Image: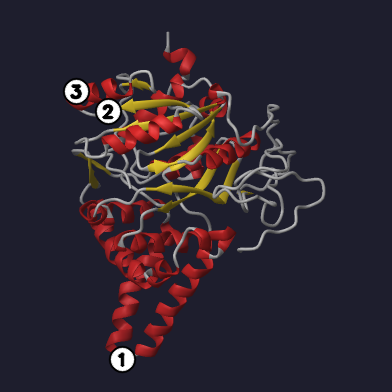
Amino acid sequence: MSRLACTPHGTRAPGEADATPMAGTTRTPGVVGATPVNGTTRTPRTPGEAGATSVNGTPSTSMAGKAPAPTTGRTPAPAAARVAGMEDRQGLDYVLPLRWEDDAGLEELTAYLRELSRHARVIVVDGSRDELFDRHAGRWRGLVTHVRPDPGLRFANGKVNGVTTGLRLARAQHVVIADDDVRYEPAALAGMDALLAGADLVRPQNHFDPLPWHARWDTARTLLNRAVGADYPGTFGVRRSFFWEMGGYDGDVLFENLELIRTVRARGGVEYHAPGLYVRRLPPDVSRFWSQRVRQAYDDLAQPARLALFLSVLPAAAAGLARRRFGALAVAAGLAVGLAEAGRRRAGGRRVFPWTASLFAPVWVLERATCAWLAVGAALGGGVPYAGRRLRRAAHSVRSLRRRPEPLGPGPDRAAR
């Protein structure tokens, strides 16, 4: 997971059998079970074609279940999806917001950028201190577009400054946004590119590799999220024209991923969940893993029902222990494991998620239940510490975003004036 000071979360965080495609639908490379989230019908942009490869290199036979349904009434711009190959480097742009405190991972990241630049135009927006920025500039000269965040952007969440700067410099319609710990394979890039032909925002699925014990612990959260809805990855695909049509998104929040998702929904965009589009993510070190616990729980303040659920866990567990209802507690732990396992099996997830991660589900639930109370305490104290300041708001509601009359920031054309 990321060492970015500007990326506070890392939700990373699929039936196994492929379903037969519906008549008249096409196939999407590298994706199993991609689905829209809104419900209004329209004709989607066709995202794929037969003969594509999946994200792990095996033949892709279909989308799981129904093909992605249209989600808004907005008339789409025509677009033709490209599949594996990606010969046109300008067809896909890749934005990487970066802010490092040291260069421990520089060699590995440079090797990744070298391979990535063969398949996409890469824009690294680097908010690292001067000596690190200069070193990066020397290593990446001729390999990527390497720039500082736009000084005119003043969002409290530095990642949003980087994303917005990168989107201003992007030329392709299809843009991948990814944290510095995300590692795309060419087939996953092709799958993302294909889905963006029919969507304004695509949510793929991150998975940790390698998998030390703390990554398996955190993977339990991913599996539970998959079982009940969708995970929050460290990477998205966005349609550049729609990003500026909606006016960007608010960076004065902690949970910037949810803020982006909700802004797209509020502006009538098409969002696809792609639980079978797997993208590797490097795990954090143990010290960073522990440092993220309360900050990630603070995200739940933007999801009141979820927060209320976790706040109820410790009182319920304490009552069970006081009344010696150990059987009921064991059943609750078993249900958590079963739910995580259902998420693991969704959209072919057994290929990338180990079964042992499901066993961590009760541990993760207790962790989140404890940290939820600490997060509420942080909110009452003025917000959660982040990059030398406190952020009070986790994310805005879709309703409040719909009421917002003006875009949050200028588009690329106006910003250049």
Residue identifier under label 3? 130
Identify the residue at horizontal 28%, vertical 35% (top origin).
Answer: 107
Q: Amino acid at mark 3?
A: Asp
Quick one: quadrant of the C terminus? top left
Label 3 vs 1, first from the N-terminus: 3
Where residue 397 appears, as percent x and y from the top left, is 46, 45
Left or right of 338: which side holds 96? left
Between the residue at mark 2 and the residue at mark 3, the CA separation in whole angstroms equals 9 Å
Q: CA distance from mark 2 to mark 1?
A: 54 Å
Q: Position of residue 129 (x, y in %)?
A: 19, 27
Distance Cα–Cα, label 3 vs label 1: 59 Å
Provide the secondary structure element on which disc 3 rests.
helix
Disc 1 crowd, CA 10 A, few/some/many (<14, 14-19, 20+):
few
Look at discs 3 and 1 and give the one toward the viewer: 3
| Amino acid type of the residue tagged 2 in the rendering | Gly
Q: Nearer the viewer, residue 79 or 72?
A: 79
Seen in the image, is 23 located left or right of residue 133?
Answer: right
Observer-nearest residue: 407 or 9?
A: 9
Q: Residue furthest right?
A: 23
